[in-house]
Amino acid sequence: MTIIRREVLTLPGVLPGPVNPLPPLRPLDDVHALDDRSTAGLPLDMTRQLGYRPLRSLLPTRLLDGYGRDRAPVDLDTIVLENDRLRVTVLPGLGGRVHSLFHKPTGRELLYRNPVFQPAAFALNGAWFSGGIEWNIGATGHSTLSCAPLHAARVTAPDGGEMLRLWEWERLRDLPFQIDLWLPEDSDFLYVGVRVRNPHEKPAPVYWWSNIAVPEERRVLAPADAAWHFGYEHRLSRKPVPDSDGADRSYPLNSEYAADYFYDVEDGRRRWIAALDDAGQGLVQTSTDVLRGRKLFVWGTGPGGRCWQEWLTEPGTGGYAEIQAGLARTQLEHVRLESAREFSWLEAYGPLGADAGAVHAAGDWDGAVAEVERRLEAALPRAAVDAAYAAWRPHADAEPGERLAVGSGWGALEVLRTGVKVEGTPFEETTIGPDQEPWRALLESGVFPEPRKVGPPGPSLVSAPWRDMLETAPARPLAEYHLGLAQWHAGDRAQAVRSWERGLELAPSVWPFLRCLAVADTADGHGERAADRYAEAFDDLCAERRDDGEVWLAATAALGREAIEALLAVGRTAAARSVWQRLRPATRARGRFRFLEVELLLAEGDLTAARAVFDEGFEVADLREGAEAIGEMWDRVAPGEELPARYDFRMRARPATG
C-alpha cells in the first residue's frame, strides 16, 4: 500500500526572496500575445476561447522578483508517496510541484529532475523554476502559485490506502482547486485527480495545463497528424506532424528556436503523450477526455535556447523539453466554467517501454504512434483510466485528515465572505494571517483599518464584492489606496486616479499614492508629470524608511528602478543619477541594476563605461521569458559586434535588416 511521509530535500539554490510591495499596475508582458492576422480560418470554438476573457492584470497578486543567482544549499520541504513500484517526491511549498517520479524496478527517473533550485522570471508574477511536473492554473502562462505554498493533507484513496490532497484558492480567477495524488497497490502509474470549481454566481474563465519536464534526448509522440505551432513571432499556424519545415519536429533537438506544438488530437481518440529514448523507454501521460489538449515545448538548439537551458540549471547537466496536457487545444485559450459547476478529470503518469525500431522508424509516424498506443493499452487500458476516475470521484469530497502543509489564508477569507462550503477542501479560518486580517476587519466592521506603524501597504483584493465594500468604507488613506487599485483593475482608471488623489491628501505616507499616480500618468502619456511624481515618491520613501529590513529594501529597490526608468525616459539624467546614488550598494550590485546602470551611462554619454559593465559581466536574475532587452542594449553599446553568448537569450531568429 502507499506510504506517505514528510522529508527535506537539500539542493544548491536561492530562495524566491521577498514579495515586491509595489502592486503590478503596468500591462502584462506580451510574450504570449497572438497576432490577430493569424486567427483567420481557425476553428470557431478555438477562436471563441482565444478571445474569452484573457488576463489583463496581475492584480491582486504581487511580483516575486527579489531573488538572485548566488546559490547555496537550501532545504525544501517535501512529501513522498511510495509503493513497491514508484517513489514520488512533491514540493508542497512550491506549487505542489512533483520534483521526482522514480521507477524502482528499473532504477529510472522518469522526469527531468533539476539538480538545482533556481528561480527565473517565467511565472506570470515572476519566480518560477524548471523541472518535474507543475500544475498551471489561472491564465495563459506559468501559474502565480509556482513558488507559493499549497494546503496538503492525507485523505483516504479509492482503494482504501492513502492519498495526498493538495488544494488552494487561485486568486487571478478566484477559483478553488484540488489535486489528489495516489499510487494504487502494485501500480506502475501515479494517479492524479484534479478538480476546479466555480462557486460564484457568474461564469468564470478556466485555464489548466499540467506541465511535465523530460530530458530532451527523446522522441515525443502523441495521437495526432497535425499541430498548432506557436513561436515567439506571435503567430499560430497549423503544421503537419511530425515533419514540418524540413525537419522531424518530434525530436526536440531538431528545432533551432523555441516553439510550442499543440497537437490536434481528434475527438474520440484516446488522450496521451509520451517521451521515449533511443531504446524506446520513457514516460507516458494519459487522462480522461476532459483534458483534451497535448503539447510539446522545445527550447531549440540555437544559442538563445542553450543559454536559457543553462540559466535554469547548470552547464553540463543536460537539457529538457516539456510535454503538457490541458483543458483546451492551445494555451492561448480560456474555457468557460458555468456558475456552481466544476471541471474534473484523472491523469496517469508512468513508465512505458515500446519497440525502439517502431518508435524511431523514419517516415512511419502512424506506425510509431500505433506501437506506443498498443503498449499503453497493455500497460494501462483506457477503460481502467475511466474506471479509476469513476472510483475517485466520490472520494473527492472526503474531508482531509492529517495536515501536512499549510497554504495561504485567502481561501478562508473568501469562504468567510461568501459562506460557501467547498467540500473536500476546507479553507479554515485559522489560516487567516496578517495579510488577510485587515480585509477580515473590513468584512466584519465595514472599516479598513489604518496600520499601527508606517510601512509599505499590504496585499490588495480587487474583485467586485471587495470593491463595493471599499466604496462604502470611511474614506481613510489605505481604504482609498486599495479602492484605487480595485478600480484600476476593473478598468475604471479615472476613478482610480481620483481615489489615489483623495488618499494622497490625507496620507501620512505619500509615496505609495504618488507611485500609483505616476503609473497612471505614464499610461496616459504624461511622461514629465510621471517623472515628477516618481522623483517625489522616491524622496518620500527615503525619508520615511525606518530600517534596512527586507520589506523596506524591496520597496526601495522596486521604486528606485521605476523612478530611474521614468526619469531617463524624459531625459532627466541628473535626477536619475541622484536616485541611483541613494540605492543601497547591495542593490546597485544586482544584475538588474547593473543593466540599468548601462542605460544611465549611455544617457550620460559615457560609452566606454557602459561597455565596461558588459565586459565585467552581469546576470539579470529576473530577466523575463522572451526578453530581448540585453541584445538591444548591446547593439547600442557595441554596434556591429556579435552579442556575447552569455547574454544571448533570444528565442527567435533575428529580423532581417536592410
Image (spheres, rainbow, N blue to C red):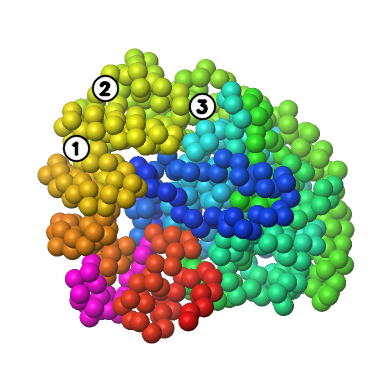
Real-space Cα distance between discs 2 and 3?
31 Å
Amino acid tagged 2: Ala
Image depth: mark 2 or mark 3 in front: 2
The percent coordinates of residue 31 (x first, y second) are 51, 58
> Viewer-proximal residue, 305 or 133?
305
Would residue 432 be found to the left or right of residue 318 on screen? left
* First reached walking from the N terminus: tag 2 or tag 3: 3
Q: Which residues are magenta?
A: 600-621
Which image quadrant is residue 112 in? bottom right
- Image height of 156 relative to 142, above or below: above
> Viewer-proximal residue, 438 or 548?
438
Q: Is residue 615 magenta?
A: yes
Label at residue 475: 2
Disc 3, SS: loop
Tell me what residue is drawn at x 27 percent, y 60 percent: 569
Badge 1 vs badge 2, beta-carbon distance below 8 Å: no
* First reached walking from the N terminus: tag 3 or tag 1: 3
